[in-house]
Image (tube, helix red, strand yellow):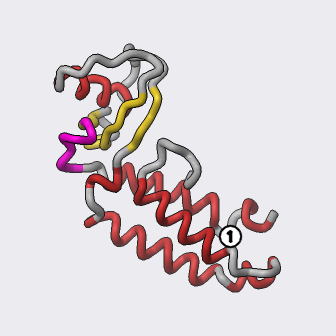
Amino acid sequence: MARRGDCPAYVQRFQQEALTLMGRARSVAELLTLSPALRTLYGTYCDGLASAPVEDLVISRRISTVDYARKCPERGAVAAYGRAGVPVAPGMTIRYVVRDARAGLADCAWEAAHADRLYYRRILAKAWGEVSCDSGVARG
C-alpha cells in the first residue's frame, strides 16, 4: 500500500516505518522476534488516527467514470467536486477525504474538515495485514 499513489499519507507512513523496522532483520527468525514491536507500532498508529490531521488522510484516485451506480467514496468525491464547481471527467485524478463511508460521502481535499476515522482504520488494518509477521505475506 505504501507504494500506491492513492493511499493516504498517514497509512503510507505507518507502512514505511513498519517496513524499515522489518528491514533490520537478517533472518526469518529475527523478523519474527520483531512482531511485538510491529504490533506496538500498529497500535500507536491506530491510537493516533483519532487526532491525525485531515490533510494526512487525503486519497488521490484516478476515476474511471463520473456515473457511479452505488454509494461509494468516489461517487461522493465526484459530487463534492461538482458542488465546488470543478468539472470532473473519466481519467482525472481527484483528491478527497472520506467523511462518511457508509453514506458514500466525501469532501474535496481542500474543503475537508472531518473524516470517517473508522473507514481509515480499515485502510490502516489492510496495511497492517500486508506487513504483519503473523500473516503469510511476511513469512514468504
Q: Residues within 10 Å of mark 1 (few under 14, many from 20)?
A: some
Q: Is residue 104 above or below residue 24?
A: above
Q: What residue is drawn where x is 26% and y is 60%?
A: 53
Q: What residue is drawn where x is 46% and y is 29%?
A: 62
Task: Give the magenta part as a residue range.
Answer: 108-114
- Residue 109: x and y in percent read 27, 41
62 left or right of 56?
Answer: right
Can you say which quadrant of the picture contains the C terminus?
bottom right
Q: Quadrant of residue 66?
A: top left
- Residue 61: x and y in percent read 44, 34
Camera-nearest residue between 12 and 30: 12
- Residue 13: x and y in percent read 47, 63
What main secondary structure does the magenta stretch of the protein show? Answer: loop
Give, as a three-letter code, the residue at label 1.
Asp
Residue named by callout 1: 134
- Residue 57: x and y in percent read 35, 52
Camera-nearest residue between 123 and 26: 26
Q: Is residue 72 above or below residue 22?
A: above
35 left or right of 28?
Answer: left
127 left or right of 80?
Answer: right
Camera-nearest residue between 128 and 8: 8
Q: What residue is drawn where x is 41% and y is 59%?
A: 10
Q: What residue is drawn where x is 49% and y is 58%?
A: 12
Inspect the magenta stretch and tell me whether residue 113 lies in it: yes
Q: Quadrant of residue 112?
A: top left
